Amino acid sequence: MDGTHEVISACWGANCFVYYKPVEQGNNKMVKLEMNLQGNVVTGKELYKQNSKEIIKKIEELYEYIYKNYVT
């Protein structure tokens, strides 16, 4: 994705964040993603392995979604 850092920075500036929510303890365990959209927290339903390629791609997709729908 081109401009990933710019998109993420713009989202952070608009008080929108994506982060892990652990469902297991320990390293590289299963996590869900949460979006904090200007104080409104939305928790995803899908499970991802922490630090996997899939979760990194999904985080980038979510930031792109936030940028298009909440920032611009």
Image (spheres, rainbow, N blue to C red):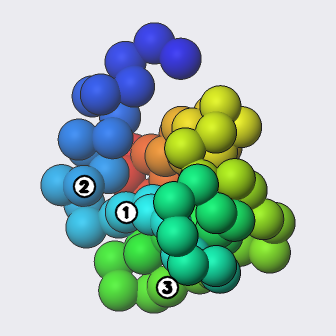
Residue depicted at 65% across the width and 81% down the height: 23
Disc 2 crowd, CA 10 A, few/some/many (<14, 14-19, 20+): some
Disc 1 crowd, CA 10 A, few/some/many (<14, 14-19, 20+): many
Q: Is residue 66 left or right of residue 52?
A: left
Depth check: 46 or 41 in front? Answer: 46
The correct choice, above or below, for 12 with respect to 44 in the image is above
- Distance of mark 2 from mark 1, alpha carbons? 6 Å
Q: On the rendered image, what quadrant is the C terminus found in? A: top left
Residue depicted at 69% across the width and 65% down the height: 30
The correct choice, above or below, for 59 with respect to 23 in the image is above
Q: Which is more N-terminal, label 3 or label 1?
A: 1
Give the residue pinned by disc 1: 17
Q: Which is more N-terminal, label 1 or label 2?
A: 2
- Label ID, residue 41: 3
Q: Tag 2: residue type?
A: Trp
Kind of element beneath mark 2: helix
